[in-house]
Image (cartoon, grey):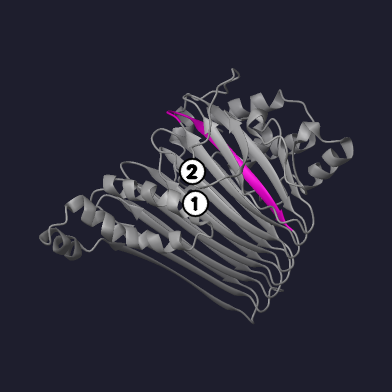
């Protein structure tokens, strides 16, 4: 066991609140969990040295931080500053049918119900999910009532100042026939460490539009997860956009717990320098007639390292499943590294499933052609690379978010050189 994990366990043992039963269970599992090494399959290409050497600490003093402004976009702001909910940035009046409450402020019966669902979508295999179970000082419980269509998106922002450590947790429930859009956004300054996990319960006929922007770079250590439980005829559309840092790791799990559930997942990440980004995506088709469409694209430059592990598991009773996984990767240098592992595990006999992965280099002839036509090398790179990613940006349901992220990605491309 690493010194960092021992310290985390010691700190968690000193917390006593309404989450104590769940925390004790997480600590029990952590006490028997080995710290991952290169021999641990789930962490084979993602060393945890950045976690072990971090100097980030929990900061108790109040700090004023605000989410970046997105043009032509308004949202219900749910803001964590260095791991603590900033109630001053939460709207005084919420739309009818939407409730946002800290777990400690719930009534006893509501707390008991929240305990029965807490950490039931996120699988126990996620080491840092257990660490988040143990160190999260509270849970924000978001509930949309049955049949309610929340017009404004909910934006969950985790903001960290230099040297801060945070462990945030949100639990979102969409009632039957409801609709909600959620944006998870992590913004960090300097050396930080964060675990940020959100669990989604999407009831029958509900619709979830989901985004996760992990655009922190530099010496940040960011490990988190978005986990979804879909009931009968529930639909979700998720978009992930990530940059690399000292260590960026995201786990996402989609559980088809009802019939005719539909899931779409589009992910794109762009890495430069010595950055690392690791995306592990697991889809569990446990019921019949479910559909999953998963598209993941990565561009890696310089000496960066990208990891993708995509697993689709078709259970024995999940007949009539339609599932497709497509992973495409682009190398911009001979020293960048991309490790991809698409998996398809099928136990039903009446399904249509496909998966595939490609790794290629940028077409240097096309780059040369553009340069001979007077296009600068940097602009030519942006033109060639942007088309590779832009297709997934076009699929984002929210036009304002798509227009906001385009120039950010274009600027990122301008900094990434073909070598």
Residue sitting nearer the eye, 118 or 126: 118
Residue sitting nearer the eye, 229 or 393: 393
As drawn, the label of residue 25 is none
The residue to which callout 1 is attached is 401
Whether residue 380 appears in this view of the structure is yes
Look at the picture and state if 412 lies above or below 27. below
Q: Which residues are magenta?
A: 189-202
The residue at 68%/52% (across/down) is 200
Work out which residue is located at the far left of the displayed protein and give it: 372
Examine the structure image and report whether residue 197 is included in the region drawn in magenta: yes
Question: In the rendered image, which quarter is residue 28 located in?
Answer: top right
Mark 1 and mark 2 lie on one chain; the one further toward the N terminus is: 2
Marks 1 & 2, CB-CB < 8 Å contact: yes
Question: Marks 1/2: CA distance?
Answer: 8 Å
Quick one: SS at disc 2? loop
Residue sitting nearer the eye, 29 or 368: 368
The residue at 21%/50% (across/down) is 378
As drawn, the label of residue 70 is 2
Examine the structure image and report whether residue 408 is included in the region drawn in magenta: no
SS majority, magenta? strand
What percent of the width, then of the height, locates residue 279? Answer: 49, 52
Question: In the rendered image, which quarter is residue 31 located in?
Answer: top right
Work out which residue is located at the far front of the displayed protein and give it: 72
Residue sitting nearer the eye, 106 or 363: 106
Whether residue 307 appears in this view of the structure is no
What percent of the width, then of the height, locates residue 128? Answer: 59, 40
Image quadrant where one finds the N terminus: top right
Quick one: SS at disc 1? helix
What percent of the width, then of the height, locates residue 365? Answer: 16, 65
Q: Is residue 177 left or right of residue 3?
A: right
């Amino acid at each position: 066991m690493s010194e960092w994990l021992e310290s985390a366990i010691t700190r968690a043992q000193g917390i006593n609140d309404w989450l104590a039963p769940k925390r004790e269970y997480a600590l029990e599992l952590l006490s028997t969990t080995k710290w991952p090494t290169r021999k641990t399959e789930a962490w084979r290409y993602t060393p945890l040295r950045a976690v072990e050497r971090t100097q980030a600490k929990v900061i108790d003093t109040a700090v004023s931080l605000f989410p970046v402004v997105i043009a032509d976009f308004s949202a219900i702001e749910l803001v964590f500053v260095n791991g603590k909910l900033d109630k001053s940035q939460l709207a005084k009046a919420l739309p009818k049918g939407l409730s946002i409450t800290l777990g400690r402020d719930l009534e006893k019966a509501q707390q008991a119900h929240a305990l029965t669902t807490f950490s039931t979508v996120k699988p126990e295999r996620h080491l840092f999910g257990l660490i988040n179970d143990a160190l999260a000082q509270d849970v924000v419980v978001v509930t949309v009532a049955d049949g309610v269509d929340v017009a404004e998106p909910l934006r969950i922002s985790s903001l960290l100042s230099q040297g801060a450590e945070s462990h945030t947790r949100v639990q979102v429930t969409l009632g039957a026939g409801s609709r909600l859009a959620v944006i998870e956004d992590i913004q960090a300054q300097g050396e930080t460490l964060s675990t940020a996990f959100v669990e989604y319960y999407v009831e029958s006929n509900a619709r979830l539009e989901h985004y996760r922007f992990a655009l922190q770079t530099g010496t940040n250590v960011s490990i988190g997860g978005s986990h979804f439980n879909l009931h009968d005829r529930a639909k979700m559309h998720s978009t992930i956009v990530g940059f690399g840092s000292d260590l960026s790791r995201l786990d996402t799990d989609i559980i088809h717990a009802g019939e005719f559930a539909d899931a779409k997942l589009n992910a794109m990440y762009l890495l430069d320098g010595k950055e690392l980004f690791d995306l592990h995506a697991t889809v569990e088709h446990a019921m019949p007639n479910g559909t999953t469409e998963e598209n993941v694209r990565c561009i890696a430059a310089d000496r960066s390292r990208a990891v993708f592990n995509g697993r689709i598991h078709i259970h024995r009773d999940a007949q009539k499943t339609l599932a497709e996984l497509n992973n495409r990767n682009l190398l911009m240098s001979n020293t960048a590294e991309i490790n991809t592992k698409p998996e398809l595990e099928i136990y039903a006999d009446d399904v249509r499933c496909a998966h595939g992965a490609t790794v290629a280099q940028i077409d240097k002839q096309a780059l040369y052609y553009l340069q001979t036509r007077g296009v600068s090398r940097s602009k030519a790179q942006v033109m060639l690379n942007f088309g590779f990613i832009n297709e997934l940006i076009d699929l984002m349901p929210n036009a304002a978010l798509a227009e906001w992220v385009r120039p950010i990605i274009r600027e990122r491309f301008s900094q990434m050189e073909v070598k």
